[in-house]
């Protein structure tokens, strides 16, 4: 019978496989002159669908699987017990904060589509770009889990328990919200859940809710394009070629896919939907693979959450349970937000679909985090083996060597 770790690995492999194929399919382009709804030739997109086997996304997927296997070998309880406050967890959190701050420095952060969310490692133009907010998203989960486990005796007290954690969350979200409201909201929501699970009182966090809502409203008002996205959500057809373009094209992709789908590589809307390999890859999946393909993706995420929650339930130490809860909430909420955006249930917001939307660092960090959940299951299996060895009756070798006495 497969262990929960094996199920998690299988789901991650399946999602990464879908991601590699669909990112390549969505990224196929032809000259705009060839795109005509009346003369569309499916053979244009059918050729080269197997090219992802040679793409950089396959390399990222292999690295992500390696990261998950590495994460599954991490001894979380050992990390929790090491060096008191001089724990490596806090070094990771501090480095993440510094990197997030560097994205806001002129000439340091890389701007894409008007947003400075990236840093580049290596020479300009050929270096590797990554989003520090992706790293912050996971290190903050582990940092808060460590803090809550250490301070669980006073987490119900506002000033000595909750407030230090809130200050850390506020600092992290404050650095990110300037350029990325969606990720900041995701991090803040997960952090609140971890703090509550760690022992903070719900009413204490409720007192902070007006400040959080006020910060979100201020961030929206400060950026006119965010206000336009809200109005486009209310009536996309009022500006069908402007702010309403994303939601309209996304809905068309779902409508054209129907139940059976148009077939792998046969999407038409991928030529019209912006960000079709990143934030809006799910409509392309629905258009090409149909309702069944969309359900498969959702089912894989639900399986990860179900199996992961079972692992968290069987984990005896608080730190491990909180890490698992934070990781699962992050993956689950991010997937829900992405799918809600592309199905026009909520206003348009750029946030990736975990393990599927294009992004090498996102795949690697997410897979490593899920590996941390798997490490709790591996630790449980090791404990069961050790307990089984301790309970085994001693072997009397002498009795084996001594022949039975003859009956009288």
Image (cartoon, rainbow, N blue to C red):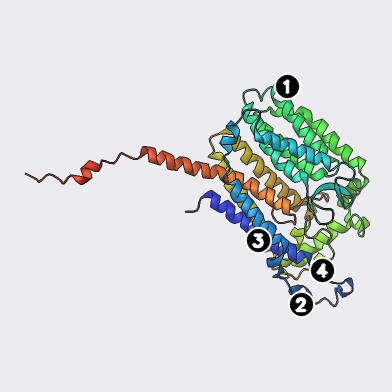
Q: Along the polypeptide, which appears first: circle 2 or circle 3?
A: 3
Q: Position of residue 324 (x, y in %)?
A: 62, 41
Q: Where is residue 314 in the image (x, y as percent from the top left)?
A: 53, 39
Query: How many angstroms separate mark 2 from mark 4 (CA)?
Result: 13 Å
Question: In the rendering, which numbered label is found on residue 159?
Answer: 1
The residue beneath circle 2 is 43
Question: In the rendering, which numbered label is found on residue 268?
Answer: none
The residue beneath circle 4 is 29
Q: Nearer the viewer, mark 4 or mark 1?
A: 4
The structure residue drawn at horizontal position 79% and vertical position 32%, both measured from the top left corner, is 209
Q: Nearer the viewer, mark 3 or mark 1?
A: 3
Q: Along the polypeptide, which appears first: circle 4 or circle 1?
A: 4
Query: How many angstroms separate mark 2 from mark 1 (CA)?
Result: 65 Å
- Specify the farthest residue to the front: 123
How crowded pointer 3 is (Cα within 10 Å; few <14, some 14-19, many 20+) is rated as some
Any part of residue 310 in sight: no
Residue 270 higher or lower than 66, as above or below: below
The residue beneath circle 3 is 17
Query: How many angstroms separate mark 3 from mark 1 (CA)?
Result: 47 Å
Q: Nearer the viewer, residue 65 or 206?
A: 65
């Amino acid at each position: 019978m497969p262990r929960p770790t094996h199920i998690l690995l299988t789901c991650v492999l399946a999602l990464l496989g879908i991601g590699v194929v669909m990112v390549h399919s969505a990224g196929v382009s032809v000259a705009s002159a060839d795109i005509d709804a009346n003369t569309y030739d499916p053979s244009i997109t059918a050729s080269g669908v197997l090219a992802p086997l040679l793409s950089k996304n396959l390399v990222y997927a292999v690295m992500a699987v390696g990261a998950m296997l590495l994460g599954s070998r991490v001894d979380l309880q050992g990390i929790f017990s090491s060096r008191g406050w001089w724990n490596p967890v806090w070094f990771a959190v501090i480095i993440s904060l510094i990197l997030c701050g560097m994205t806001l420095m002129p000439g340091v952060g890389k701007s894409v589509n008007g947003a400075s969310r990236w840093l580049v490692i290596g020479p300009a133009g050929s270096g590797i770009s990554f989003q520090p907010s992706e790293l912050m998203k996971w290190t903050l989960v582990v940092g808060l889990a460590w803090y809550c486990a250490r301070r669980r005796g006073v987490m119900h007290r506002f000033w000595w328990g909750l407030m230090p954690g809130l200050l850390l969350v506020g600092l992290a979200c404050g650095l990110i919200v300037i350029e990325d409201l969606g990720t900041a909201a995701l991090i803040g929501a997960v952090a609140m859940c971890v703090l509550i699970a760690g022992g903070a009182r719900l009413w204490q966090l409720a007192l902070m809710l007006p400040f959080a809502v006020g910060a979100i409203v201020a961030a929206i008002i400060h950026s006119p394009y965010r206000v336009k996205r809200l109005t486009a959500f209310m009536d996309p057809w009022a500006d069908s070629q402007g702010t309403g373009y994303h939601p309209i094209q996304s809905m068309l992709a779902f409508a054209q896919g129907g139940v059976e789908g148009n077939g792998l590589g046969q999407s038409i809307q991928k030529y019209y939907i912006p960000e079709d390999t990143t934030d809006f890859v799910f409509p392309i999946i629905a258009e090409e693979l149909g309702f069944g393909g969309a359900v498969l993706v959702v089912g894989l995420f639900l399986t990860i959450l179900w199996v992961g929650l079972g692992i968290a339930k069987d984990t005896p130490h608080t730190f491990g349970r909180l890490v698992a809860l934070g990781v699962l909430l992050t993956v689950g909420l991010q997937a829900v937000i992405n799918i809600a955006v592309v199905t026009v249930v909520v206003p348009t917001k750029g946030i990736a679909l975990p393990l599927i939307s294009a992004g090498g660092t996102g795949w690697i960090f997410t897979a490593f985090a899920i590996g941390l959940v798997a490490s709790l299951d591996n630790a449980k299996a090791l404990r069961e083996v050790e307990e089984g060895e301790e309970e085994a009756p001693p072997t009397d070798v002498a009795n084996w060597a001594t022949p039975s006495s003859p009956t009288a």
